[in-house]
Image: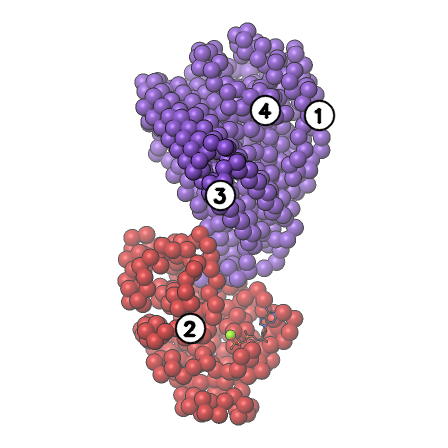
């Protein structure tokens, strides 16, 4: 087993007054791709919010240890600056905020945190344009308002673009594959694969095997009723597709 | 996110609340004919001006204070206000300007020395403290282009024909209660005349500062752009923190002749008062532009962040055929501020067009009202208007109200109105913070995004100032 970069231990968390995560245990290993599958409403997005520090989440018990520290009380931006990235299931629209301006602010916040000099506008744009092209995005996306009026697929590609610019250490992808056409799925998967460097860890939340064929997960976890009830290798996907979640029993 | 954090984030302290310790020449509170004669005499005005003031005063006596605005405030006691205050040293040149005033303007970031330029760009400044203009820069250079840029008091003495012709021509002295009061007691302000075919080579700017206690400020601005000319004019305002509310009632008249264009930008940052609204400026302003000639254009851009009460409707009378009127506004109300602001676009000429973009931001107990009138006259064939009024709410104790009125005598007029009300959502804030952006920066990014269409209308240096000012209002953020 590789080194554990994030250790979620007996996590109990409430959202909207209701306990959704009920003693969840999960260990993310360095350089590995972890896939999470599970029925609608099981708590997958809630888990991603708990890891990133969303306001709606109230942690009742348990710990999230990241790089050796319990981060459950950290501000969202501090978690982000330390390398945790979430690609949202539904990226929000922010009218009037220029996409490039936003992303440069984020990139430079991170660089500052790392003690690196800020990128000037030209340096930044060169990099951003290159990735926009790689991801098959329209060049106009650079100067449009953040996610405003983007199609579902465009929003998802924009998430991947941000991921690639920010170079995080732990990447949570919440249904990055939902609503993507075939070409977009390939472009997004290639983007993700490019980010694999043997150190970075991925937590891929999905309902479909298709994306998993591209990005080849090391582990499949089944999240049901607020807990990880099963962890296995990639062979579990076929079994789930065949039998559904009902057949999986808590180990 | 917790409400108190958001409140903190939007209630940055008023940074311009310092008082200048200068000797003031001030009349005792109260208003009567004698006071008006005194003001007129102080200004060394000709007899005709004194008579006009008295006429306005008598009209004002017969008028009633309007109360249709969506505003609540204690009755104003007009007899408790002092109508004239002036720094005692009247300067002839910059060397004679009281160093304390120079220092105060430097503190505000407005250099009165000509060699010191704002953000590297030449800007001619008329600096008004309380009732008098203390310094106008770059006058000589402007004169070479035939441009007149001086205080209104100077204009009354030196250019009586122009003043007689245009003053009260757009805003009649009895236009409304506050305009009548201003016409009687106005103490200073700025006069601009751009001759035919001249493009004013620099930004013109007036900075108004209320300093003396218990005084009102009643400035009067008159800008005439002759045929084919262009001018961009900016005004800024601030005042020290006080316990008592002070009255500010200005009148601005703009006249654009054939093919002329006037761009008028305001960054209003009068002291807003405390959380109860105590001590802020009452800002009752009449601003109106007349597009007199064909193809003329008047554009108002305002960023209103200060004052306890704002009552202000910069308007355009589109008389010339094909003339264009624009209104771009950002109004911020936090603390207990109340703003009732908007515009009137009066379409008289053929193919006239107007654009209204209004952005209201309310936070804490702030109340923000947009009030707009689009009027299309019987002869205004082909008139077009586009209006967009957006409100941004921060928290749930504040309010936004929209009152658009349309009067159309021309069935062919084309009028579009859009209105939205949004809240800064937790999802937006969280999204930005998840990317490593601090909460404070995230709030300001969302607010700037909301105001973008208006900021893009401001001259560059002022857009920077407006953004900084908005950030200041947002300062004290979480952390
Ligand atoms: N803000 C909230 N207030 C109340 N309940 C919430 C809130 N957010 C989520 N929930 C509830 O928590 C449960 C888990 O939601 P979550 O979004 O984590 O599910 P999911 O596993 O991601 O499902 P899906 O596969 O449909 O995306 C659901 O029953 C949902 O209705
Ligand atoms: Mg989900």
Vertically, is B379 above or below B457?
above
Determine contact: label 1, label 3, CB under 8 Å.
no
Residue B194 placement: quadrant: top left
Tell me which label, 1 or 3, sits earlier in the chain.
Answer: 1
Closer to the camera: disc 1 or disc 4?
4
For the point 32% across and 52% down, the residue is A120
Q: What SS does tag 3 mark?
A: strand
Image disc number at residue B415: 3
Closer to the camera: disc 2 or disc 3?
3
Which chain did the image draw in purple? Answer: B
For the point 42% across and 28% down, the residue is B320
Neighbours of disc 3 within 10 Å: few (<14), some (14-19), many (20+): some
Query: Residue tagged by mark 1?
Result: B77
Closer to the camera: disc 4 or disc 3?
3
Q: What SS does tag 1 mark?
A: loop
Query: Residue tagged by mark 2?
Result: A179
Q: What x and y, as percent, mark residue A139?
A: 31, 59
Q: Mark 4 lies on which chain?
A: B
Q: What x and y, as percent, mark residue A1?
A: 41, 86
For the residue pair B52 and A113, the one nearer the viewer reads as B52
Give me the C-alpha separation between circle 1 and circle 4: 21 Å
Q: Can residue A108 be seen in this view?
A: no
Which chain did the image draw in red? Answer: A
Image disc number at residue B175: 4
Q: How many marks?
A: 4
Tag 1 and tag 2 share a subunit: no
For the residue pair B254 and A251, the one nearer the viewer reads as B254
For the residue pair A239 and B236, the one nearer the viewer reads as A239
């Amino acid at each position: 087993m590789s080194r554990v970069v994030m250790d979620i231990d007996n996590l109990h968390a409430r959202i909207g007054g209701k306990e959704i995560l009920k003693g969840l245990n999960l260990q993310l290993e360095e350089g590995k791709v972890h896939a999470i599958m599970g029925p609608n409403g099981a708590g997958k997005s809630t888990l991603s919010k708990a890891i990133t520090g969303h306001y709606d989440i109230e942690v009742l018990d348990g710990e999230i240890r990241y790089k050796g520290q319990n981060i459950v009380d950290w501000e969202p931006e501090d978690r982000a600056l330390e390398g945790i990235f979430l690609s949202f299931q539904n990226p929000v629209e922010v009218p009037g905020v220029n996409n490039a301006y936003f992303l440069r602010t984020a990139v430079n916040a991170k660089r500052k945190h790392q003690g690196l000099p800020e990128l000037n506008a030209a340096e930044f744009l060169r990099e951003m344009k290159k990735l926009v092209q790689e991801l098959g995005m329209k060049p106009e996306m650079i100067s449009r308002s953040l996610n405003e009026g983007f199609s579902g697929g465009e929003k998802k590609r924009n998430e991947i673009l941000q991921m690639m610019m920010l170079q995080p250490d732990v990447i949570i992808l919440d249904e990055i594959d939902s609503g993507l056409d075939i070409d977009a799925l390939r472009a997004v998967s290639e983007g993700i694969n490019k980010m694999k460097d043997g150190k970075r860890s991925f937590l891929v939340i999905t309902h479909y095997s298709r994306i998993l064929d591209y990005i080849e997960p090391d582990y499949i976890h089944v999240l049901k009723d607020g807990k990880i009830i099963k962890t296995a290798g990639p062979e579990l996907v076929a079994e789930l597709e065949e039998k559904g979640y009902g057949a999986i029993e808590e180990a | 996110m917790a409400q108190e954090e958001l409140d903190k984030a939007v209630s940055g302290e008023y940074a311009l609340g310092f008082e200048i310790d200068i000797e003031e020449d001030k009349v005792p509170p109260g208003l009567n004919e004698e006071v008006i004669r005194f003001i007129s005499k102080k200004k060394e005005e000709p007899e005709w001006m004194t008579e006009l003031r008295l006429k306005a005063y008598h009209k004002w006596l017969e008028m009633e204070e309007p109360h249709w605005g969506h505003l609540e405030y204690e009755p104003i006691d007009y007899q408790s206000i002092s109508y004239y205050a002036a720094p005692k040293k009247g300067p002839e040149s910059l060397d004679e300007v009281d160093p304390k005033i120079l220092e105060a303007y430097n503190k505000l970031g407005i250099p009165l020395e000509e060699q010191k330029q704002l953000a590297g760009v030449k800007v001619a400044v008329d600096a008004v403290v309380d009732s008098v203009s203390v310094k106008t820069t770059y006058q000589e250079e402007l004169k070479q282009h035939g441009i007149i840029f001086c205080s209104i008091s100077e204009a009354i003495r030196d250019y009586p024909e122009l003043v007689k012709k245009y003053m009260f021509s757009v805003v009649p002295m009895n236009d409304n209660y506050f305009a009548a009061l201003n016409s009687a007691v106005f103490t200073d302000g700025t006069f601009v005349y751009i001759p035919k075919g001249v493009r004013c080579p620099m930004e013109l700017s007036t900075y108004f500062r209320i300093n003396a206690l218990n005084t009102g400020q009643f400035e009067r601005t008159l800008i005439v752009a002759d045929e084919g000319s262009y001018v961009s004019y900016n005004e800024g305002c601030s005042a020290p923190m006080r316990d008592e509310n002070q009255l500010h009632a200005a009148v601005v008249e703009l006249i654009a002749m054939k093919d002329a264009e006037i761009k008028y930008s305001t960054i209003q940052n009068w002291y807003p008062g405390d959380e109860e609204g105590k001590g802020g400026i009452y800002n009752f302003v009449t601003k109106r532009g007349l597009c007199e000639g064909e193809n003329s254009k008047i554009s108002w851009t305002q960023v209103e962040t200060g004052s306890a009460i704002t009552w202000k409707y910069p308007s355009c009378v589109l008389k010339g055929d094909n003339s264009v009127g624009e209104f771009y506004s950002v109004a911020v109300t936090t603390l207990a501020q109340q703003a009732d602001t908007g515009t009137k676009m009066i379409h008289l000429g053929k193919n006239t067009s107007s654009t209204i973009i209004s952005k209201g931001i309310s936070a804490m107990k702030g109340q923000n009202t947009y009030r707009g009138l689009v009027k299309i006259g019987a002869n205004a064939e082909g008139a077009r208007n586009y209006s967009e009024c957006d409100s941004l709410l921060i928290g749930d104790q504040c309010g936004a109200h929209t009152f658009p009125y349309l009067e159309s005598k021309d069935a062919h007029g084309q009028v579009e109105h859009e209105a939205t009300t949004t809240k800064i959502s937790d999802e937006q804030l969280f999204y930005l913070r998840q990317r490593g952006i601090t909460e404070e920066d995230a709030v300001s990014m969302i607010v700037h995004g909301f105001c973008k269409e208006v900021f893009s209308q401001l001259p560059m240096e002022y857009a920077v100032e407006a953004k900084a000012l908005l950030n200041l209002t947002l300062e004290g953020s979480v952390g």
